[in-house]
Amino acid sequence: MTKISVTSDNIFPIIKKFLYSNQEIFLRELVSNAIDAVVKLKTLIKLENLYDIIDDFKVKIIIDQINKTLHILDNGIGMTKEEVDKYINQIAFSGAEEFIKKYKNISKTDSFSNIIGHFGLGFYSSFMVAKKVMILTQSYKKNEPSIFWSCEGDPNFIMKEIEKRDRGTEIILYLNDEESKEFLEYDRILKLLQKYCKFMPITISLSSKSKEDKEIVINNIYPDWKKNPLQLNDKNYLDFYHELYPNQLEDPLFWVHLNIDHPFHLTGILYFPKIGKKIDVQKDKIHLYQNQVYITDNLEGIVPDFLSLLRGVIDSTDIPLNVSRSHLQYNTSVKNISKYITRKVADKLDLMFRKNRENFQKKWNNFKIIVEYGMISTQNFFEKAIKFFIFPTLDNSYFTLEEFREKIKENQKNKEGKIIFLYSSDQEKQYSFIKEATDRCYEVLIFDSPLSVHLIQKLELSYKDICFVRVDSDHIDKLINFKKKEKPYSELSEQEKQNLKNLIQHYIMEKFKFSIKLEDLSKKDFPFLIIIPEFLRRIKEMNSTMGKDIVEKDKYYQLIVNTNHILMKKILKETSEEERKSMIQEALNLTLLSKDLLHGKDLTDFISKRLKNLIQE
C-alpha cells in the first residue's frame, strides 16, 4: 500500500487555493514566526544562563517600493543550516512543537508558553503574495554560520552559507507585480499590522525606505487583559476600550475581566456597550486572540449568541483552530470556555445588582435587551439572570419577578387562579386601557422590547402560576377576575343581541375581517373596543420577529360590542337603514381612530364628514 505524501510539488497550490483563503493572512503568519523567534531566545537566556545576550528585542517590517520587496526582520533565536533544512525544507514540521517538547519540564507560567510556532505551513503562506522568497538567518549560537535560502514557489530552492550577519532572521518577499502590489502600500500594511499584531508581546515597528513614511511602533506589548484586575482602575479599562475601538465615541456601561488558568487558560475583557432596544449587526465585535495574536472576530460557538452583542477581547491557547488558523474547531474545551464566559457575565451582573441596585436600575434600559436575549437562548444564564432581571412599572419602580409576584398575588388573578402580570408595550397607544387598569389599583409593567414576547413565553413555561397579559388584550374586567358587588345586567334580550350582531357584521364585513364578540360591559364603557386577544397577538409578534409578513392582519383583531351602551338600543330602534349604517360606521371609525387603524380614503372621508357636520351645525 502506497502512502500519500505531502511534498513541495503539491503543497503550493494547496496553500494558494485551499489552506489560506485570505491573502492578507501571510503577514500575520510571518510576524508571528518572528515573535516566536524572539520569545524562544528570551526563554533560552533564562534556561541556559545566556546573560551575555543583552538586546533590545524587536521585530521590524520594512517596505521597499523601489525593489518591490517587503522585509520582516527579528533579532531572535535565528536558525542553523540544519534547522533551516528541518523547519523550512520539510514542510509542515513545527519548530515550536519540538522546542516545547525539549523543554517540557518548564513551568507553564514561564514565557515559553507564549510561543506560537508556525514555521512550515505558516511560512509558506508567503507564496500567496510573493513570486520569490528569501531567508537570511544567523543562529544565536555564535560558532554557527549565517545561512541564505531562496525559493521561487516551486520544488527547487537554493541554500548556502553567507557572510556573517547579526543574530536573527530576515524574510524578504519579492511581491507579485500586479495582484499583490497593495502590500507595498504603507497604509495597507499599517492597517493589517494594527489588525493582526496590535497586541503581540514583542515590539513591532513599521518603516518604509520612502522618506515620507516614518518608522512607528505598532503594538501595545502588555495589553490590559494580560494584567491583574487589581492593577487596573476605571480609567484604564475605558482607555483600553477606546484603544480597541478608536471609532467608538461613547464609553461602555461596564465590563467583565476574564482570567482563568485551570482547567483551561483564558484571559480577556468584555465590555457592555449601550444597546437600547435595537439588536443591530455589530461592526465592532469581540476579538479572539491566541497569545496576543489576532485570529478572528467570528466567535460562533465560543460565546453564546447573546454575548455577541458585547465588545472586547478573548485570548486563549485552548481554543483549537485548523492548521491555517482560519476556522475554529469545536470540542469539550470550547464548550467549557463558553460556559465559563456565560457564568462570569452573569456573576458580574448579579454582583452589580446586589452591590448598587440604584445604579444598576439607572443603566438597565441600555443593556436589558442583552439580558433578555440571554435568558431566552441560554438556560444556564436564565437560571442566574432571573434573580437580577428587573421589571419596570408605570411609575418607574423596578421589581424582580419574585418581588412583583409577591406584590400583586392577592389582587391580580384570573378565573383559573393564575397571577396576572399586566403589561403595556406602548403607554401612549394603550392609554385608555392602562387607565381602566390603574383606576382599579392594578399594577402595570412596561414591556417594550422587541424580544418581550419571547421572554414572556420563557417565563410562563418556567413559572406555571403566572400569566403575562397585555393591558389592551381585552376589557380589564375580563382579564382579571374583578369581583363587583353588582354585576352589570344585560340591557338586551338574546334575540336583540343576535339582531345587533347581524347588523354590525353586515355593515363592517365589507371592509374588515374582524371577529365580533358581544359583551355585557358597563354603560360607562365605550360602545366598541378593538382588541387582539393575547394568544393571537403573540402569534402575530412572533411572526413579525421571524420576518413573516401576514397579509390578512385584520384576522388578529376582535371587535368587542358593549351591549349595555345606549347606542346599541338606538341602533336597534332605528328604522332607516342608511341612518343605522351611519351610526355604526361613525362609532366604528372613532374606535378605529383611537387604535390608529383608520387610514387612507376611510380617514379622509371621516374627517371630511365631521368637518361638514361642524359647518352645518
Image (spheres, rainbow, N blue to C red):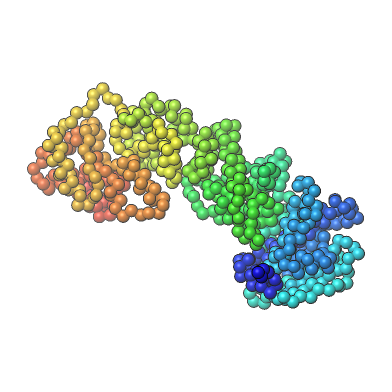
Quick check: can you spot residue 159? yes
Q: Is residue 436 left or right of residue 19?
A: left
Expressed as whole percent of the image width and height from the top left, the position of residue 473 reads 32, 39
| Residue 114 vertical position relative to residue 378 in the rendered view, above or below | below
| Residue 51 vertical position relative to residue 417 in the rendered view, above or below | below
Closer to us: 554 or 89: 89
Q: Residue at x 75, y 55 (%)?
A: 115
Closer to us: 223 or 149: 149
Closer to us: 440 or 126: 126
Expressed as whole percent of the image width and height from the top left, the position of residue 415 reads 31, 30
Q: Residue at x 43, y 44 (%)?
A: 454
Q: Is residue 367 left or right of residue 206?
A: left
Q: Residue at x 23, y 50 (%)?
A: 512
Q: Quadrant of residue 283?
A: bottom right
Q: Residue at x 65, y 62 (%)?
A: 324
Q: Quadrant of residue 140?
A: bottom right
Q: Quadrant of the C terminus?
A: top left
Quick check: can you spot residue 364? no
Expressed as whole percent of the image width and height from the top left, the position of residue 320 reads 64, 54
| Residue 249 vertical position relative to residue 145 in the rendered view, above or below | above
